[in-house]
Image: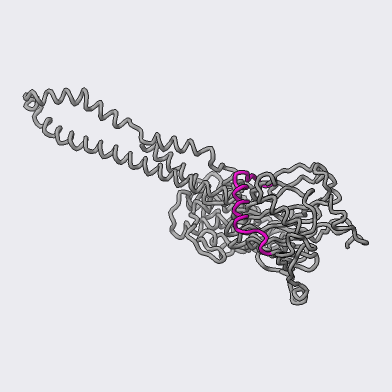
Amino acid sequence: MKRVLSFIFWALLFCCRCWTTQAEIFTSISQMTDLIYTEKELVQSLREYIKAEESKLAAVKSWANKLDALTIVSTSDPEGYLAHPVNAYKLMKRLNTEWSELETLVLENPSDGFISNMSTHRQYFPDEEDETGAAKALMRLQDTYQLDSEAFSRGRLPGMHSNALLSVDDCFDMGKTAYNDADYYHAVLWLQQALKQLDAGEEAVVSKADILDYLSYSVYQMGDLPRAIELTRRLVAIDSSHQRAGGNLRYFERLLMKQLNELNQEYQPASEEPIQLGTYSRPKDHLPEREAYEALCRGEGLQMDEVRRSRLFCRYQDGNRSARLLLKPMKEEDEWDSPHIVRYLEVLSDEEIKKIKELARPRLARATVRDPKTGVLTTANYRVSKSAWLEEEDDPVIERVNQRIQDITGLTVDTAELLQVANYGVGGQYEPHYDFSRKDEPDAFKRLGTGNRVATFLNYMSDVEAGGATVFPDFGAAIRPRKGTAVFWYNLFKSGEGDYRTRHAACPVLVGSKWVSNKWIHERGQEFLRPCGLTEVD
């Protein structure tokens, strides 16, 4: 019984931790909703198991109570008791038959059904990679939207407050995930939050000594020796026999004294200010425009001023007198003047969006990018979403959408890529990138045989509660998702040269689920529809 309950506890703990975070592989909200229903089924199965155990225990208790009363009588005068023939018979019967029945009852295992149900669903469970990805997604949101660990831990996100709280153990696991990845910056933030909640009296499985062990070393790795010494001293005070603490403390103290002597400085005690967002500088990474990109995601650094705004207009677009748009032209709004980015309103109806999602859901897989050297599609850490490719043969709605894109843009979609549908869960993103291939990537689209990506048509198929904007770091634009609308821009000048200003990104989704569909239009077939310009940048 105890072993079964222990198994159930850890199984459910695993499920809950995986399902209540947005894992990097489970980056589609659409697919993760299936896990919610799986968890509900498992909880129901668990309740049935508990009910069966309670019923079994009640029967055993009833047996025990009856036999307890009987043995009190029989042991008070064994010979007198057995002098009665009925008592002698019933003793034989009990020991031969009824105790065997009780043994069978005790050996019954009501957990078999629950274990079988768990085994059936386990193949669909997230794995360790997913849980690690989930933790990294939270850290990505933390960085992009400058949220401290306490905000996450207490369920305080911009524009909302929920009861989705993180315990001491959750925060410790977050910190340990970062620590194991040598990401000491995030390790410090989350381990400090775990320590803060533990000091406040919150119960936890993890010990204070374990938190201080990881935290002190992470702080040392961030170069803060005085604080590392203070934290290690706390650890030694709690556990003087800790196998690493004593050695680390002596090493840290010697290292600090050496540094002070070299700089001819006096010892300054560690700051009493708690570690929080901004205490340490975030390490630089591979992305040169990281700060500008994340600022735009937060709505900061926008370069839209009154002069530029005065150059933006709205109009009706009939696609150069397309027969299908003459009676009902598209509503077109300028989002940016140069490069020219426009938004079309009411491009997709709710019914069309519903059908496209329905077609895409069973095909959603980790989104890929085209390897610039080989042209082969592959996954990448800088693109975190789930995507599916839809053909016109899949459903008439795809054919209608493709035709509509052709009518609106005046470009042929015969040489365009299939309609790509993507679903970004919380933390889902696509870091700054170009849609077109550069000169050092001549083979990026060679397999397609249709030339470079001349233009991008991006349909927004959902509203997003927070985050998820499309941003252009080069010129400081941010475009918010609006369900049913689409944005369009050219990636290439008329000369065929790439417009490097169109480097863009999909900001991480903070709250909500972001659905989009892309149509990448290629050069071949556009020769007379979009003739070459006279200069390289026409």
Residue lying at 68% horizontally and 55% vertically, measured from the top left: 258
Tell me: residue 113, above or below residue 514. above
Q: Position of residue 102 (x, y in %)?
A: 25, 30
Task: In this rendered view, identify the residue nearer to me: 127 or 455.
Answer: 455
Q: Quadrant of the N terminus?
A: top left
Q: Quadrant of the C terminus?
A: bottom right
Q: Is residue 457 left or right of residue 495?
A: left
Task: In this rendered view, identify the residue nearer to me: 131 or 531.
Answer: 531
Q: Residue 229 appears in which quarter of the rendering?
A: bottom right
Tell whether position 262 is magenta. no
Q: Is residue 290 left or right of residue 34?
A: right
Residue lying at 72% horizontally and 43% vertically, measured from the top left: 378
Looking at this view, name the residue that lies furthest to the right. 534
| Magenta region, residue range | 345-367
Q: Main secondary structure of the magenta part?
A: helix
Task: In this rendered view, identify the residue nearer to me: 421 or 367.
Answer: 421
Q: Position of residue 234 (x, y in %)?
A: 51, 55
Tell whether position 362 is magenta. yes
Q: Position of residue 44 (x, y in %)?
A: 40, 45
Does the rendering let one see residue 27? yes
Tell me: residue 27, above or below residue 306. above
Task: In this rendered view, identify the residue nearer to me: 312 or 212.
Answer: 312
Does the rendering let one see residue 179? no
Q: Position of residue 530 (x, y in %)?
A: 85, 58
Q: Residue 426 appears in which quarter of the rendering?
A: bottom right
In the rendered picture of this protein, how many numbered marks are placed on residues? 0
